Image (cartoon, helix red, strand yellow):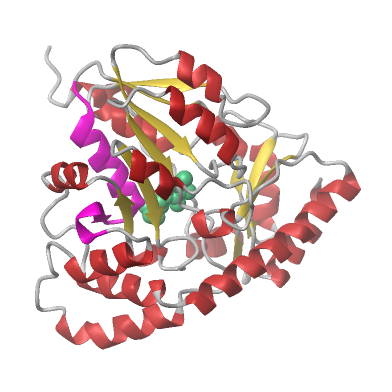
Amino acid sequence: MKSLYREQLATMNPYIPGKPIEEVKKEYGIEEIEKLASNENPLGPSPMAIDAIKNEVENIHIYPDAAAIKLRTTIAENCGLEYENVIVGNGGEQILSIVAQTFINDGDEAIMAKTTFGLYGSSVHHMGGVPVKIPLKKYAHDIDNMINSITEKTKLIYICNPNNPTGNITSREDIDRFIKKIPNNIIVIFDEAYYDYAKVNPEYPESLNILKDRPNTIILRTFSKVAGIAGVRIGYALSSKEIVKEMGKVKGVFNVNKLAQVAAIGALGDKEHINKTVELNYKSMALMKEYFESKGFEYINSNSNFIFVNVKRSSQDIFEELMKKGVIIRPGHLWNWNNWIRVSTGTIEQTKKFIECFDEIR
Ligand SMILES: *Cc1c(COP(=O)(O)O)cnc(C)c1O
């Protein structure tokens, strides 16, 4: 019998979210929980974003600006573009759905790393496309294999830079070599959710320069990580005016709410909060690296706000044992890396608590 549902749903699984803090507290009877599972900002939201929301809250009886002109203009000014080069979404997540909806016809192929952000594959599959997943090489995007996998059907190539969950960057040198080999009619998507953390590494490529020469490029960024406003859902993409126009046809009319629009403008102006966040990130990261090195645990060099480490045991067991002690991490089995865990950087106190608890159960 014909299925009631869109046929792709039969082969799709629901996303497994991290457990909410309140639920863990109840289930395990613990008071203090440190959530180092979702790469949120341990310093909290940008104070300028909070102020902006407070000032706007009286106006929520009015629909938001569907075109989000003020926000798009502010973003554009920040990166030397025009507002027509910017599309905003209900989180970077929505931007990724819009990308698939804009480009993928039945049977189109999209190349991506095998171990990367799960939404690339699921959004492409949902639209009837075929995700072509290339295994990592030495824990990094295998650029050459990705190039060699291009066929007549290739529409999109995703580069998660830095990559989630591994945290490492693809260097400018590799990206330059890659981009020269990609036909102009293929869309290259750089997911730069961790841009502000990554750009302190001199090897990190400036993808805006690529966009200037190569219009079929999309750069994705978000306010969920460094800006600390994951809860209001706002992310954006930078691309050619033509691509932004086409993506705008499927974005949903009022896709970014009024509070998110003003919060994002506030956060963009809050350089102090960004700097503090990045500084804390690398301090916490250094504590974890030092600990892992001293105990002989292999980790991947990260320019994100999390670290991926080989714990040499079942990640599910480690996950549960840490949870009982009040620390939530992301177990690697979700990516079929069964002995690895992903840990977000916390405050110094949170990070020390993770290290202490991990040391007790390892
Ligand atoms: C967090 C993240 C995003 C976007 O998250 P949103 O909260 O939806 O903006 C996109 N890509 C990667 C790799 C991420 O880690």
Horizontal side of 220 relative to 246 (left or right) equals right
Quadrant assignment, res 318: top right
Is residue 357 among what the camera can see? Answer: no
**Residue 138 point in image, percent of width and height:** 68, 27
In the image, is residue 124 above or below residue 222? above
Give the residue displayed 36% in from the left and 44% down from the top. 211
Who's the residue at 59% across and 52% down the image?
A: 304
Q: Quadrant of the C terminus?
A: top right
Q: Which x, y percent locates residue 349?
A: 72, 71
Q: Which one is in front, 140 or 63?
A: 140
Residue located at (36% from left, 77% from top): 266
Indicate left or right for 268 with 169 as reference.
left
Q: Position of residue 168 (x, y in %)?
A: 62, 42
Q: Which quarter of the figure is the N terminus placed in? A: top left
Residue 337 falls in image quadrant: top right
**Nearest to the observer: residue 102 or residue 20:** 102
Q: Which stretch appears magenta?
A: 82-105
Residue at point 51% right, 26% down?
114
Residue placed farthest to the front in the image?
Answer: 213
**Magenta stretch: dominant secondary structure:** helix
Q: Is residue 84 magenta?
A: yes
* Horizontal side of residue 200 vs 254, given as left or right: right
Was residue 358 drawn as part of the magenta stretch in this picture? no
* Image spot of residue 316 (x, y percent): 64, 39
Q: Nearer the viewer, residue 330 or 89?
A: 89
Spot the residue most to the right.
Answer: 294
